């Protein structure tokens, strides 16, 4: 079972939920994958020992000008404007290339080969008995979805996989959420939280991923997010009230479930709630 923890905006407590949820479960049967490849931070709480690391890249075109007829076909087929064909030159804007291979496939002169362009690394290891993996995008690199997909490939089907998604609702988040069994949308009870929850809920609906909400710092704002959940039929999985102990432990990089059994039980209940809702969805879909 793959559970992705997402939020429409940063700073809502997404990583806190992902890390504590993973640690509250049987760690031998659980793994956590941090797909926030621009700034992975789950490792700061889990302090894993990494034993594997590999470079991830995408194939970008390399033009053999001696074979090229400058027909312009490659720039026509590129949906990302990554190629410009001039009178006697073909310019490749590698940072725009998505590595789809379309230009090489359709070049009539077979003048295009592919070159590996590194975009980042994936690392994996153990945090105690918990399997852990994440990606690190190279500084200045914009092409994060291929790296996110590489992190997701580390998912072990025999384990419960908790995925920490990047914040927002754009391509990187879609890559992290796509194909998961359930999405936990972490939000906060403020107008900004509500606005971004709405965007995130629209995204998961488009991707047809069942979802539920967790309201963090639930006692500090207004009741509009709860109203929204009722109106939209979005299950409210849990409300997390502000707790000074949690905030202090967070500031020290310590997951609260390792120090407070009440919080461990709370996150176990969250998992039970997710598992029941997900089973319900599967039952409905099979009718
Ligand atoms: S499609 Fe091939 S032959 Fe045509 S301009 Fe591009 S590289 Fe050159
Ligand atoms: S591989 Fe795809 S994205 Fe990259 S330049 Fe060729 S057509 Fe464009």
Image: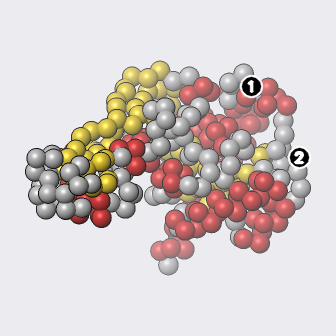
Residue shown at the point (47%, 21%) measured from the top left: 49
Whether 54 is drawn above or below 185: the answer is above
Which one is nearer the viewer's eye here, 98 or 72? 72
Furthest toward the bottom, the residue is 287
Horizontal and vertical percent position of residue 200: 64, 59
Q: Which mark is residue 251?
A: 1
Horizontal and vertical percent position of residue 263: 74, 37
10 Å neighbourhood of mark 2: few (<14), some, or many (≥20)?
Answer: few
Determine the image quadrant of residue 13.
top right
Q: Can residue 91 be seen in this view?
A: yes
Q: Earlier in the sequence, mark 2 or mark 1?
A: 2
Q: Is mark 1 on a helix, strand or loop?
A: helix
Q: What element carries label 2?
A: loop
**Left or right, residue 84 beside residue 125:** left
Whether 142 is drawn above or below 255: the answer is below
Do tag 2 and tag 1 residues touch (Cβ < 8 Å)? no
10 Å neighbourhood of mark 1: few (<14), some, or many (≥20)?
Answer: few
Q: Count the marks: how many? A: 2
Pointer 2: what residue? 220
Which one is nearer the viewer's eye here, 115 or 210? 115
Residue shown at the point (34%, 30%) measured from the top left: 54
């Amino acid at each position: 079972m793959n559970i992705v923890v997402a939020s429409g905006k940063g700073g809502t407590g997404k990583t806190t939920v992902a890390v504590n949820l993973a640690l509250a479960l049987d760690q031998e049967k659980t793994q956590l994958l941090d797909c926030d490849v621009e700034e992975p931070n789950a490792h700061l709480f889990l302090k894993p020992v990494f034993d594997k690391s590999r470079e991830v890249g995408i194939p970008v075109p390399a033009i053999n000008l001696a074979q090229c007829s400058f027909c312009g076909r490659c720039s026509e087929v590129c949906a990302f404007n990554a190629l410009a064909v001039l009178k006697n030159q073909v310019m490749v804007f590698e940072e725009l290339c998505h590595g789809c291979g379309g230009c090489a496939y359709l070049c009539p002169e077979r003048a295009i080969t592919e070159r590996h362009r590194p975009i980042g690394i994936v690392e994996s290891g153990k945090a105690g008995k918990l399997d852990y993996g994440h990606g690190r995008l190279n500084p200045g690199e914009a092409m994060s979805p291929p790296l996110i997909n590489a992190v997701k490939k580390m998912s072990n089907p025999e384990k419960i996989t908790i995925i920490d998604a990047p914040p927002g609702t754009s391509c990187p988040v879609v890559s992290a959420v796509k194909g998961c069994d359930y999405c936990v949308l972490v939000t906060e009870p403020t107008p900004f939280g509500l606005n971004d929850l709405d965007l995130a809920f629209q995204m998961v609906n488009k991707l047809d991923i069942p979802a539920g909400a967790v309201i963090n710092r639930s006692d500090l704002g207004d009741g509009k997010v709860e109203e929204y959940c009722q109106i939209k039929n979005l299950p409210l999985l849990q409300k997390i009230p502000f707790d000074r102990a949690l905030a202090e432990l967070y500031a020290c990089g310590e997951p609260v479930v390792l120090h407070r059994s009440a919080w461990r039980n709370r996150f176990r209940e969250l998992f039970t709630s997710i598992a029941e809702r997900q089973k319900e969805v599967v039952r409905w879909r099979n009718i």
